[in-house]
Amino acid sequence: MNNFSSSMVLLGFSGLVLAVEPQSLSPLTITATRTDQDTRLVSSTLINRDDIEQLQAKTVEEALRGIAGVNIVNNGGLGKNTSIFLRGTNSDHVLVLIDGVRAGSATLGSTAFHHLPMNEIDSIEVIRGPRSSLYGSEALGGVIHIRTRKGADVIAKPFFSFGMGSHDHYQVSAGVSGNYKDTWYSLNLGHEKSNGIDSCSGSSSEFFGCFTEEPDADGYRNESGSLRLGHKFGDWLTLDGHALYSTGDTHFDGSFQNQSDFVEQVFGGKAKIQVTDDWALTLNGGESRDRSISGLDGVETDSFNTQRISFSAQNDFTFLKDHILSLGYDYLIDKVDSSTSYDESSRDNHAFYTQYQGQYLQHQLILGFRQDHNEQFGRHSTWNAAWGYQFRNGVAFSASYGTAYKAPTFNQLYFSGFGNANLIPERSRSYEIGLSGQHPWGNWSINSYLTYISSLIAFDSDVNLPNNIDKARIVGVELMADTRIYDFDIRANLTLQNPENLGGGRNNGNLLARRAEEIFRLDVDRRWGDFGFGTTLTAEGSRYDNLSNSRKIGGFVILGFRAEYELFDQVRLQAKVNNILNKHYQTASGYNQDQLNVFFTILYSPELGI
């Protein structure tokens, strides 16, 4: 992004903060502390079901692109590999939870966001900054917690939606949820199919990017289902069970593989026991599976089936007022079953952690410590400390420090022709200060952070393998604001970051691959009775696709419009136009992104019972 564009972004953001009217406070987030305690010491964003439907977001990428601290890379459109870089860290430095269960591939170390069905998601919570002192490995850059649809507040609330748009893209979903006395439930099914776009432009690459251009559309298909069931037994026990299943196939361009069948599934349960008035015990466990079978023109070439089984037990002791002490235990085992041989195919991890949260007049304090014992890499200790002060005018100041670590993935260590068995775990330390305001006229926050990562793992073209970079430094500033001006709901996010390689050698001082230095998003929505409309502007600066910074990807600005009309009671019609400027852009070298495209949806959601 050039200086003029950056200046315009800053001016637009400044104007937003100055002209505002009443707006509600930010919602409570739970993932940041693993408790129900409210805190302003952790930077977070919560996107709920109402937000998803207002934005008409059809993918996780659409919902999160441009959110503060979030940098998204997509390899060629709908259903293609989608990576999230949080606060400039690696894409496998984000811990992903689905209904509290650790999700993702044990071989890749990342989650297939592109296969998660949006029609079955109730909320997405983004926690920025290291949370290893609570969650261990993977939470170096932050946590993304995705929750499936929950029970409605009536006996039965069915819904149905049908949508269609460009590239013969269509979605069908239906479900029913409800609540009767102390029991709640939710059942949902979905189907999606698209002919897709031509994913690959045929650029060359040292490692990233696509090598072979096939002038054809690369389609995608997805069938999904989710279930949730819970019951509250008096005041002492609450049980909740859940399951999410997604399967289908995707096509892409390649000389060795051009199609893949996939299965993503997560299931688990949670029990919360109120042992005494001051002591609550929470048990949480589940399993996630990531399966893929890849091939060339219908002939299978390889298969991967990874399994993650996790369990946690947490005791929360509340003493005095606004003081909580948490003591917990986590267990995780990763397993790999593949047509490719791995030197090691399983690895477990045991961890004990503790956290204290306290409120003293206008002061708030969080202290946390965790020790992990990894079967392969031994013991690792991480900790964090955060302090904040609440001024009487709604403004709060916070300062924090946290350490984190990340164990190498099975692919980074052992994948044939790619793995490097000499890799060691990555470690980091992060400093952050923040200033935020919650007022009758709106909310705003400014967070600045400094992160040092030692032994950062990245693909090194000098050895043609993943390698430990000696050091990386990430400096960043995030600005967020939401308000209402003359009945227009306005939300803005700005990220400025410098993810720098300090590992020495010829790449010293270069930017880390695939991170944009400037990211901006502006959402504006307005309703007039039964009619509503909105727009989203997203701007991202240029980035490099390799460590040597020899292959540059240009920045871009994309603009979209959406409209909604309530045709009848509980029947809504929606229309969305994406990339109305018809911008040709890429987020990964050689991989095309969709240009001007449209999508139309009809939603029906009656309420049965009272």
Image (cartoon, rainbow, N blue to C red):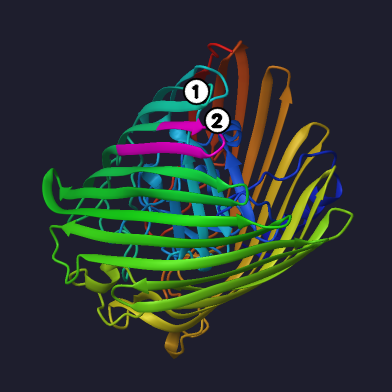
Q: Which residue is mark 1?
A: 601
The quadrant of the picture occupied by the N terminus is bottom right
**Does residue 302 appear to the left or right of 567 in the view shown?**
left
Q: Residues within 10 Å of mark 2 (few under 14, many from 20)?
A: many
Which residue lies at the image location 48% right of the left edge and 83% below the top edge?
471
367 or 425, which is in the foreground?
367
Which residue lies at the image location 30% right of the left edge and 61% below the top edge?
333
Q: Which residues are magenta?
A: 228-246
Q: Residue type at mark 1?
A: Thr
Q: Is residue 140 visible to the viewer in this orientation of the structure?
A: no
Question: Any magenta on residue 239?
Answer: yes
Question: Any magenta on residue 102?
Answer: no
Secondary structure found at label 1 = strand
Image coordinates of residue 507 in percent, x first then y, are 45, 83
Image coordinates of residue 421 in percent, x first then y, are 25, 79
Extreme bottom residue here?
A: 505
Which residue lies at the image location 69% right of the left edge and 55% below the top edge?
39
Image coordinates of residue 335 in percent, x first then y, are 24, 59
Q: Dots 2 and 1: beta carbons under 8 Å? A: yes
The vertical placement of 164 against 411, above or below, is above
The quadrant of the picture occupied by the C terminus is top right
Mark 2 and mark 1: Cα distance apart in space: 9 Å
- Main SS of residues in magenta: strand
Q: Residue type at mark 2?
A: Lys
**Does residue 230 appear to the left or right of 48 in the view shown?**
left
